[in-house]
Amino acid sequence: MRRFVGILALSLAAAAGFAATTDSVEEKDLYEYNNLVSRIEKAAPPQVADNFIIFTYPAGPRFVGIAFDFENYQIIHPYSVRSTRDVDGNIVNSVLFYLLERPADITSITYRLVIDGLWTADPENPLHVYDNENGITLSRVDIGAPPPETTGIRKNGSTTFIFRGEPGQTVRLAGTFTNWDPWIYELQETQPGFYELSLPLPKGRHYYNYYLGMTPVVDKTNPMRAYTDDGRTASVIEIN
């Protein structure tokens, strides 16, 4: 499922008079999706952010769409616009974007853009490939394979917590076992964008979240969720 409309975004397709549909974002992915959209500030090369690949383009064209090799370039997905405003509500910056959910079993994606009716390679992406058979230049993004590990692995009496995100972040862990203090445990980045921490937790049910600064983030590798007494959404792990 490819998703292209999120909070703070208005569909360019609708503005251009094209029919567009909004795929529903599963609740467990909604926070991640909206968090990624809120951090888009300017056009840049494609970025891999855990479950999504972020494509951006400078604001200005009436319509920008993207088509992928794994769909045989048969579907054009419209970009959306992300605008930031000042305290008076005036738009101070806009950028076009498309968020692609990471396709399963694919480590490299070739694509092309259509900008106001003209096909082109992505000028924001320096990685271009030439299609000799069709005589066109395409863009490519290498996304690699996601790490297979998930939170909950038990080894030598310890439980491993896993976080996947952008490289170079500071990721901390807090939960009922720290009285929700986010400054006690920090995950280590063992490979780019892959963070982990092992703790000797006692048996029982534990509630926890990761923290990026002071922002809580649920564990996307763990489908178990619950609401805590103070109303927050937390991840849940059972230690037997």
Image: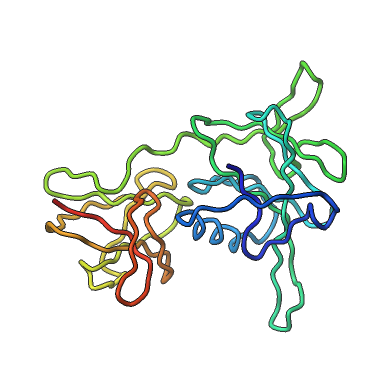
**Which residue occupies 65% across, 65% down?**
8
Q: Position of residue 170 (x, y in %)?
A: 40, 60
Taking the image as shown, residue 100 lies to the left or right of residue 31, namely right
Q: Position of residue 116 (x, y in %)?
A: 87, 45
Count of picture labels: 0
Taking the image as shown, residue 227 lies to the left or right of residue 204, namely right
Q: Position of residue 216 (x, y in %)?
A: 40, 67
Q: Quadrant of residue 112?
A: top right
Report the front residue among 120 and 225: 225
**Which residue occupies 49% across, 30% down?**
105
- Give the position of the N terminus as an image quadrant: top right
Report the front residue among 194 and 5: 5
**Which residue occupies 77% across, 16% down?**
133
Taking the image as shown, residue 134 lies to the left or right of residue 4, namely right
Q: Quadrant of residue 178?
A: bottom left
Establish if 130 lies above or below 77. above
